Image (tube, rainbow, N blue to C red):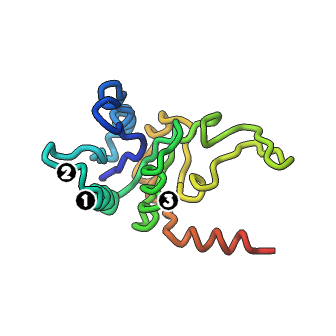
Amino acid sequence: MKIYLAGHVPKGDHETKNFVDWRKQYEKLLPDELEAKCIYPYDRSPEFDEADFKKVFGYDCSLIKNSDLMIVNAQTRLGVGTSQEMVIAKYFKKPVITVLPTDSYSRRPNVTIRGQLIADWIHPMIDAFSDLIFDDPEQLSALTKERLSRITPKDISVIDKSIDYANKK
């Protein structure tokens, strides 16, 4: 099973020096039963031309297309790249599992918005493009092939369905 690990990627050599690779932690948590081959989006050959932005985008899209599943690290604030990867996963009808702890940037307990108390606020874009949300990365260890087979991944039609839902009176 190919699993695309979406989340923060260091930008530039200065970030790479102090980067703690959360992907290795996630990979270790996945059960052996999944026979997971984790896809790291920045794992490219040294000759890869990072200045060719169309090539970078196309390469990343092909990695998502050829994956069976996407796991998103939303423990910290998501960047534009990660959020777009979630949309691309829906375009390719891939299941998306998001690790989104309570009391993080995109998930807050007991938030009041326009006078309405929301007990467990989740960023609407993350909610829309996720098929399953975990509070803690440790929950990845409970993934089984059987559990994954029960996920019916949302596809890109989630956008039109959400528009229709919002326009209901």
Quadrant showing the C terminus: bottom right
Residue, disc 1: 55
Callout 1 crowding tier (Cα within 10 Å): few <14, some 14–19, many ≥20: few
Q: Quadrant of residue 120?
A: top right
Q: Secondary structure at mark 2?
A: loop
The reply to whether the C-beta atoms of the residues labelled 2 and 3 are less than 8 Å apart is no
Q: Which mark is residue 49?
A: 2
10 w.r.t. 147: above or below: above
Query: Looking at the image, which residue is at 42% across and 62% down?
Result: 88
Q: Is residue 35 visible?
A: no
Residue, disc 3: 151
The reply to whether the C-beta atoms of the residues labelled 2 and 1 are less than 8 Å apart is yes
Earlier sequence position, callout 3 versus callout 1:
1
The reply to whether the C-beta atoms of the residues labelled 3 and 1 are less than 8 Å apart is no
Earlier sequence position, callout 2 versus callout 1:
2
Callout 2 crowding tier (Cα within 10 Å): few <14, some 14–19, many ≥20: few
Query: Would residue 164 be found to the left or right of residue 14 on screen?
Result: right
Residue 94 placed where, x, y %?
A: 42, 61
The amino acid marked with disc number 3 is Ile
Pick out the residue farthest to the left.
47
The amino acid marked with disc number 2 is Asp
